[in-house]
Amino acid sequence: MTGATLVVGLGRTDRRDDGVGPAVARVVAARVPGGAVEVRTEEDPTALLDLWEGHDHVVLVDAVVTGRTPGTLHRLEVGTDAPPLPAESWAGTGRAGTHAFGLATAVELGRALGRLPARVVVVGVEAADVDLGDSLSPAVVAVVEQAADLVAEEVTADVPG
């Protein structure tokens, strides 16, 4: 297992607020000291099983649609060190996110296959608009820095010194 925490910004930058994961990941990459974090962006949650292989700690950032106020931040621990989640816990973060094969499905598949890291934290950002377009909505832009702060706290919690 690697000592670096993996941060994955999930989402498509051509689907407006769905691009918040990559936007937050870019901010985190600029803030966290080199070697402490590996930042990746990914459009497809099915790729997570391979991306997080070899990592003990993963932070996933994704747009969610739950009906809450756009820009609301969600935090959920789902790794093997966390207690099993009841199905309704995923409903609070948008069970399928904005993807047909959702983040919840990828996490639960990883758990079933014994390929889920020990610590996985999901940071969800409530989306206002996931239609075609290349800009985030004002409500989501307003919380990118706050979401990056939350991710950076997760990452630096495991950094020695």
Image (cartoon, rainbow, N blue to C red):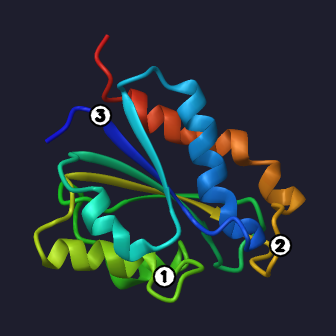
Would residue 126 be seen by someone viewing this image from the given angle? no
Real-space Cα distance between discs 2 and 3? 33 Å
Question: Which residue matches tag 1?
Answer: 95
The amino acid at mark 3 is Ala
Query: Could you say where residue 136 lies in the image, as x and y percent from the top left?
Result: 81, 61
Say the numbered circle drawn on residue 133: 2
Which image quarter: residue 108? bottom left
CA neighbours of label 3 inside 10 A, class few (<14), some (14 to 19), many (20+)? many
Say the numbered circle drawn on residue 109: none
Query: Could you say where residue 27 lies in the image, as x and y percent from the top left?
Result: 63, 37
Question: Which residue matches tag 3?
Answer: 4
Depth check, front residue: 50 or 17: 50
In the rendered view of the protein, which quadrant contains the C terminus? top left
Circle 3: element type: loop
Task: Say above or below: 53 vs 11.
Answer: above
Query: Could you say where residue 33 lies in the image, as x and y percent from the top left?
Result: 46, 20
User: What residue do we see at 35% from left, 82% from top?
Assistant: 105
Which of the two discs, 2 and 3, labels the residue nearer the N terminus?
3
The amino acid at mark 1 is Arg
Task: Say above or below: 155 vs 98.
Answer: above
Q: Name the mark nearer the viewer: 1 or 3.
A: 3
Which image quarter: residue 97? bottom right
Q: Name the mark nearer the viewer: 2 or 3.
A: 2
Which of the two discs, 2 and 1, labels the residue nearer the N terminus?
1
Which of the two discs, 1 and 3, labels the residue nearer the N terminus?
3
State the residue lying farthest toward the top. 161
Tell me if label 1 and label 3 are in contact, CB under 8 Å: no
